[in-house]
Amino acid sequence: MAMDGKALGDEIAALITDANAPDEMKQKIEKLWEEIAGAIVKHIEANAVVTVAAGIPVATSGSATSQTGATTSTGTGTIA
């Protein structure tokens, strides 16, 4: 699933915004958190390194010197 800065910002804004706050204030808070979350997502996408453990099953085809392949099951990665 792709990271979504707008959705993350909207979720954070919903958590911290008082239900009785004026609509204008709610909109300002939501827009600010969308911008903050968008910056966080961009930073993670630009700098995160995903390391996947060995052992994910793969299927290959081709000759001994020219293999092609793809994973045949999911693997679990760690973001560093």
Image: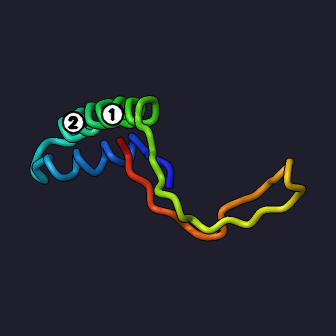
- Please, is residue 11 above or below residue 70 in the view? above
Q: Where is residue 63 drawn, in percent x and y?
A: 89, 56
Q: Residue at x 22, y 51 (%)?
A: 14
Residue bearing mark 2: 29
- Tell me residue 5's x, y (percent): 39, 40
- Mark 2 or mark 1: whose residue is earlier in sequence: 2
Q: Residues within 10 Å of mark 2 (few under 14, many from 20)?
A: some
> Amino acid type of disc 2?
Ile
Q: CA distance from mark 2 to mark 1?
A: 16 Å
* Residue 55 image position (x, y, % from top left): 54, 64
Residue extending furthest toward the front: 64
Closer to the camera in the image, 10 or 57: 57
Location of residue 72 with respect to 62 vertically, above or below: below
In the image: residue 66, left or right of residue 50? right
Check the image and name the residue furthest to the right.
63
Residue at x 86% of width, y 48% of height: 65
Q: Tell me the SS state at disc 1.
A: helix
Name above or below for residue 73 compared with residue 25: below
- Binning the other alpha carbons within 10 Å of mark 1 as few (below 14), some (14 to 19) or many (20 upward) gives some
Residue lying at 48% horizontally and 53% vertically, measured from the top left: 52
Of residues 66 and 23, the one drawn nearer to the viewer in this rendering: 66
Q: Which residue is mark 1?
A: 40
Answer yes or no: do the residues labelled 2 and 1 have beta carbons within 8 Å? no
Residue type, mark 1 in image: Ile
